[in-house]
Amino acid sequence: MTPTTEAVATATPPAHRHRWFALVIVLTAFFLDLVDVTIVNVAVPSIRRDLHASYSAVQWVTAGYALTFAVGLITGGRLGDIYGRRRIFLIGIAGFTVASALSSLAPGPGSLIAARVLQGAAAALMVPQVLAIIHATFPAEERGKVFGLFGTVAGLGAISGPLIGALLTQGNLFDLQWRPIFLVNLPIGLLGLVLGRRFIAESRAPRALRPDLVGMVLGGAAVLMLLYPLTQGRELGWPWWGFAAMAGSLPVGALFVWHQRARTRRNGSPLVELSLFAVRSFAGGTGVQLTFGIATGIFFLTSTLYTQIGLGWSPLDAGLAGVPFALAVSVAAGLSVAVLVPRFGRRVIQAGALVMAAGALLYLWQADRHGTDLHFWHLVPPTVVMGLGMGLVVAPLADTVLSEVPRAHAGSASGLINATGQVGMALGLGLVSVAFFGVAHEGDHGPVLVAAFVRSLWWVTAFLLVAWALMFALPKRAPAAAADDD
């Protein structure tokens, strides 16, 4: 049975009576992950001052999380298929909560990075289950509405993280500096644990699957060999072994694919179902996720360094500057799923990539024109345009990519989707070493950081245009209307 045929047979699960409560819980976990990323971005300058950390160390505070998240996502998704998505989700949210507590207690850069690595590993267990639980719990006719809510939550996460992070950091509650940005996760995580046990229905692959330990090692090694030297290379002076590791990630990746094919023939229980890539919507969507993740990874970190260090803004000012962006994401996400995608299909997602690229170019023009004299109102037009573009992409993309995926492999597919996006994000954070720190160096301020940010925006624009080109591989029509397409 082909993946597409199997998808038809498994696309409509029986409606679970607690499914809307379950949706609130898993979207809250998704929101927690988004807020954590954006909170940390705003607090980076404060962390740097308080812990006397170098640029490389604060880059690893964000990249360490993204790296372990990316390495573990595929495994996390498959573990949900094997052992139960609710069980792995609850283990992940418990680990995320513990790691948040450890992050808040970190006495130095090294311990904070270690806690963030642990937090990323826990998120790799938690986040893939979000889309998998949605895919396994909701019937096909309800998923459009659900993914509209998914996009709205993405926008709310984008707006809430910077504001909460700015308020907590600048407020300096109990003289704790940046530490409350991690403490805020604790009550949310504990509530998610309690309610998740009550309202989320357990689901797993309908046939017995076994863990693929060799695949986990090979897949993780290939990603780590690529991302670690890319992120750390500038700090170490680009040593020869870094280039050797990056080159070596290709044959290790090829060995991983060979192993997955052999395991599929032997026992039908690989870490990655390579047959998923025969589904056009899935194969094209993962490529889009990768390049889009690179663009956003570069943008979010460099924009924080630009506004707070280059322009000398406070965390609250920087957080407020992101409000128009986040509001635009929320509005566009709701419109794209409810109104635009059902009518115009793939063209909406492609238009989103072009609109976001136009916003990046407008941002670049404003930064280059005003230099260190740039004010909040100068950023409203470019951030609104970028937010509208992002909202048109993020909300319908997940539904498009998962639309033809068999429920038996929902966890693995969800892990792959998240993994390619997070690998892209980690690649983007690694490329900050070249795009931004290729111009700016330790101790630089003002015009130098403005020039570095302008250069970074050219990189962002280029990757958004690559994502737009890859979107031609997606189905022309929205999933619900795909059968009507020629």
Image (cartoon, rainbow, N blue to C red):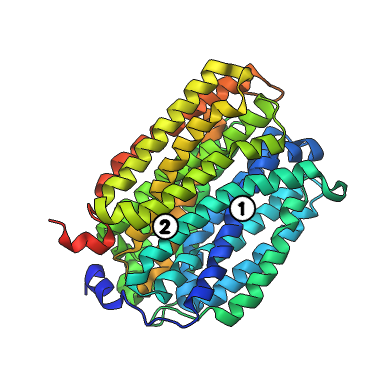
Give the farthest residue toward the right.
174
Q: Which quarter of the picture shows residue 33?
A: bottom right
Quadrant for the C terminus, please. Answer: bottom left
Residue 376 locus on image (x, y percent):
61, 29
* Mark 1 and mark 2: Cα distance apart in space: 20 Å
Residue 477 locus on image (x, y percent):
23, 55
Viewer-side residue, 216 vs 49: 49
Left or right of 455, for residue 110? right
Q: In front of the other: label 1 or label 2? A: 1
In this figure, which residue is indicated by the disc labeled 1?
35
Q: Which quarter of the picture shows residue 195?
A: bottom right
Q: The disc labelled 2 sits on which kind of residue?
A: Ile
Kindly check if marks 1 and 2 are in contact, taking CB atoms under 8 A apart as contact: no
Q: Which residue lies at the image location 48% right of the left edge and 55% below the top edge? A: 152
Q: Which residue lies at the image location 29% right of the left edge and 40% below the top edge? A: 469
Q: The disc labelled 1 sits on which kind of residue?
A: Val
Q: Which residue lies at the image location 40% right of the left edge and 33% below the top edge? A: 357
Quadrant for the N terminus, please. Answer: bottom left
Residue 324 locus on image (x, y percent):
54, 39
Q: Is residue 431 visible?
A: yes
Viewer-side residue, 180 vs 473: 180
Circle 2 residues within 10 Å: few <14, some 14–19, many ≥20: many
Left or right of 59, for residue 443? right
Q: Secondary structure at mark 2?
A: helix
